[in-house]
Amino acid sequence: MYDVIIIGAGAAGLMCAIEAGKRGRKVLILERNKTIGEKIRISGGGRCNFTNVNANHANYISENPHFCKSAFARFTSENFIELLDKHRISYHEKKLGQLFCHNSSRQILDMLMNESKDANVQIALGCSVNKINKEEKFVVSTKQGEFTSESFVVATGGLSIPKIGATDFGYRVAKQFGLNISQTKPGLVPLTFTKKDVGFFSELSGVSLDAIVSCNRVSFRENILFTHRGLSGPAILQISSYWNQGDAISVNLSPDVDLYAFLKERQQATTELVTILSEIFPKRFAQLWCERFTPSLPINRYTLKKLSVIASQLHDWKLKPTGTEGYEKAEVTCGGVDTNELSSKTMEAKKVSGLYFIGEVVDVTGQLGGYNFQWAWASGFVAGEYA
């Protein structure tokens, strides 16, 4: 018999357990993997991009964009940094407010394990849940036996990265108890294209460009990366969460240089277009761009109107993705348990007393750069104060 049972020993589940344990609650975490925090371990190239100093509700996608405000007001990125300082974990800001461990993501896992021990949290690893019932209390049947609790917290994550154990378990629990699910899709994921486009991209595989990528009135300026399968890189991953099937994206390949003015200044020269474009772009990109879109001639052979068209193509390159690389390559899952079903103050289900949902399983999805971990910490913290 426990006060609180939490399903999932990831970022949200561990944070919730620690806070509930500090209140003197008897807490058990059930984790189907043989280790805790697999997403923490692999994130940020093994250094864990554990938060972002700029985190606020504007960095998140949800059918109710205001839902996450309460949690972020009560547990900020500064609060998590205080925890790192307490454990003497050194960190650095990489770019755009993204914070990483100096050494290894293992430090974050060790910190969470130590905090869990101090809060007398019990963790059962390799423990799959077979069935959940609610009578007077929650009854959880597992391959390690039957457990009961007053409160039951679902912190199982989304569908992304199934190779580290992601499943639809959290959504099944929500449906079992009559809660709605907002449509799910892969987020922060590379985009795929037609064979014709991919043929062009694969010849540029490995080339990275600073660009502004736009879709559905949202824009991101970071690098794009050409691959053998399509387009990736931070700007593409960011826009993928806002992209829907059938949408086109716009790529501005020259955010800092007005290409029409740049080309117009050189119009009297006899230099070939490809050579002039190579002053701004990688040579291989300039060559292949000219081969596909504009045969390279001495620039004095182009009219000003034609130079304007060339500049516009590079500033507003329209592409229509055919899809994404799916949950296998997605960093997060967009959508999830409908926020209208939950209290923003406690993360408790409005229809089912004692049932909580936290982290990625909820319809709150952060942008790239530590935002999803901050949502995990914050939602876990507030649920831990009440469960």
Image (cartoon, rainbow, N blue to C red):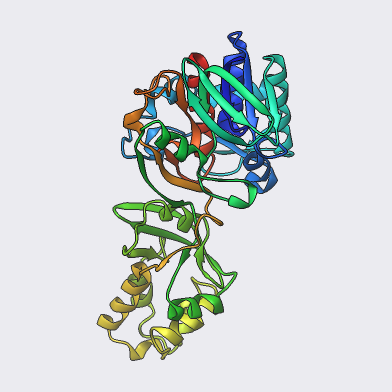
Q: Nearer the viewer, residue 92 or 203?
A: 203
Q: Nearer the viewer, residue 272 or 152?
A: 152
| Left or right side of 143 for 299 | left
- Residue at the image position 61 percent from the left and 27 percent from the top: 14
Position above or below: 58 against 117:
below
Residue 305, how many percent across, how many down? 25, 81
Residue 52, how many percent across, how many down? 52, 36
Position above or below: 169 against 271:
above
Q: Quadrant of residue 90?
A: top right
- The total number of labels drawn is 0
- Residue at the image position 47 percent from the left and 46 percent from the top: 333
Residue 40, how many percent across, how many down? 64, 39
Q: Nearer the viewer, residue 314 or 13?
A: 13
Res 80 seen here: no
Res 48 seen here: yes
Q: Quadrant of residue 148?
A: top right
- Residue at the image position 63 percent from the left and 21 percent from the top: 28
Position above or below: 15 against 330:
above
Residue 154, how many percent across, how many down? 51, 30
- Quadrant showing the N terminus: top right
